[in-house]
Image (spheres, rainbow, N blue to C red):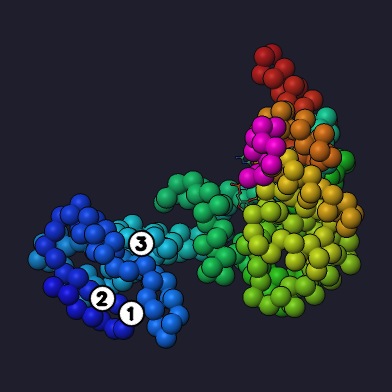
Amino acid sequence: HMASVDPSNLIIVSELSDKDAQSLITTFIEQLPQNIIIEQQKIPLDIQVGVSLSNGLEDRPEKLVNNALYAANSSKLAINFYETSNLERFIEHQEINILLSEAIANNELHIVYQPKVQGDGKLIGLEALLRWNSPVIGFVSPAVFIPIAEKSGLVTSITRWLISNISKQICDWQKAGLELVPVAINISGADLDQENFHEHLVKTLIDHKIEPQLIELELTESASSICHKKALSTINYLANWGFKISLDDFGIGYSGLSKLISYPVNKVKIDRQFIKDIDKDERKAQVIEAIIAMCKVFDIEILAEGTENFAEVDTLIKLGCHHFQGYVFSKPMEPKDIPRLLMIQNVLDYNKSKTLVHRK
Ligand code: C2E
Ligand code: MG
Ligand code: MG
């Protein structure tokens, strides 16, 4: 049975198994012309099929049609099966949002710090990374919950919590007389869109007697703000106060270059995608070389993210990149371990001393 819902959508209803449905649709698509000609213009025919299977009589027809339409638009593939996981994902997002909104008050978030180093292991900075252990759904990666919090706007409360927590932490390290290195905070676009984000950040640091030079702000590609002008003026304000500005995950998005031109950037963090296996991939090496040359023109520092072995590190040093952050040097560390690292000021020496302590 065939019916047309609107000028661009056609419905086929058939009693078939999923395998047969796949071959029926494939044959159907093959029989259609690739182009149609209207007024001597060749127009490519773009077809997307959504399949929704009913397992019995309990499914309402309108639900089946809706699910098929949802599946058809869910990707650019020609044939898409509706999967309940689409809906499950939606519910999961809602659940994460609700739990996350309570996580701050319930003390479920904590911060770990990953060292940034030179090739010889000398400590040059730390990056604050969030960890969430939910009593309901267990450990959730920030790669999962941050994008959800960015969509819902919850991320701005998380960033505020983060700023106050880090300020207290740095203040404690300062009081203990430790030699400090800059601490990087990841900032989202929604933070930059807030009216008083910069005032709040500056005030919190002044309250804790922390110099802005000790704070690095990492802007990700996903940190695209709604209002470019507002974001730009906030970043300029913060840069004038002496905060270091970094572009995170550089290379994977599409706006990295334009940010490089319009923002007062001090550092570019090259995404792990370009770093992985760089010692074996000539093309990747050429790309990195070009990025390094470009950053030299702007007087911008470069750091390689996610270095996992010394073959990658050595290749990067040869190409002219001298700052690193990655598992080969150190995984993110618990706050209690940072004072000793700050005393030693070298990650490789710190790791050696740790094995000695264990062996004792
Ligand atoms: P990012 O800012 O690019 O942080 C680096 C991520 O790479 C971290 O993942 C880190 O643990 C991981 N990483 C470091 N070295 C290696 C390595 O050698 N190999 C591999 N495979 N991975 C490595 P994490 O902690 O899971 O964070 C993921 C992302 O979540 C971060 O990427 C950042 O975009 C976001 N994020 C984390 N904490 C925060 C936060 O407090 N605020 C905001 N807005 N975003 C955050
Ligand atoms: Mg980062
Ligand atoms: Mg990154």
Find the distance from the CA under tag 2 to the CA under tag 3: 14 Å
Q: Is mark 2 within 8 Å of ligand 1?
A: no
Indicate the amino acid at tag 2. Answer: Leu
Find the distance from the CA under tag 1 to the CA under tag 2: 7 Å
N-term-proximal mark, 1 vs 3:
1
- Helix, strand or loop at disc 1? loop
- Image quadrant containing the C terminus: top right
x, y percent for residue 4? 23, 80
- Helix, strand or loop at disc 3? loop
Indicate the amino acid at tag 1. Answer: Ser
| Residue identifier under label 2 | 10
The residue carrying pointer 2 sits among few (fewer than 14), some (14 to 19) or many (20 or more) residues within 10 Å by Cα, namely few
Find the distance from the CA under tag 1 to the CA under tag 3: 15 Å
Q: Nearer the viewer, residue 214 or 323?
A: 323
The disc label shown at residue 78, or none = 3
**Region in magenta:** 272-283
265 lies left or right of 228: right
x, y percent for residue 215? 81, 55
Farthest-out residue, top = 360
322 lies left or right of 328: right
Which residue is depicted at the point 71% across and 75% down? 228
Which residue is depicted at the point 53% across and 49% down? 141
| Residue identifier under label 1 | 8
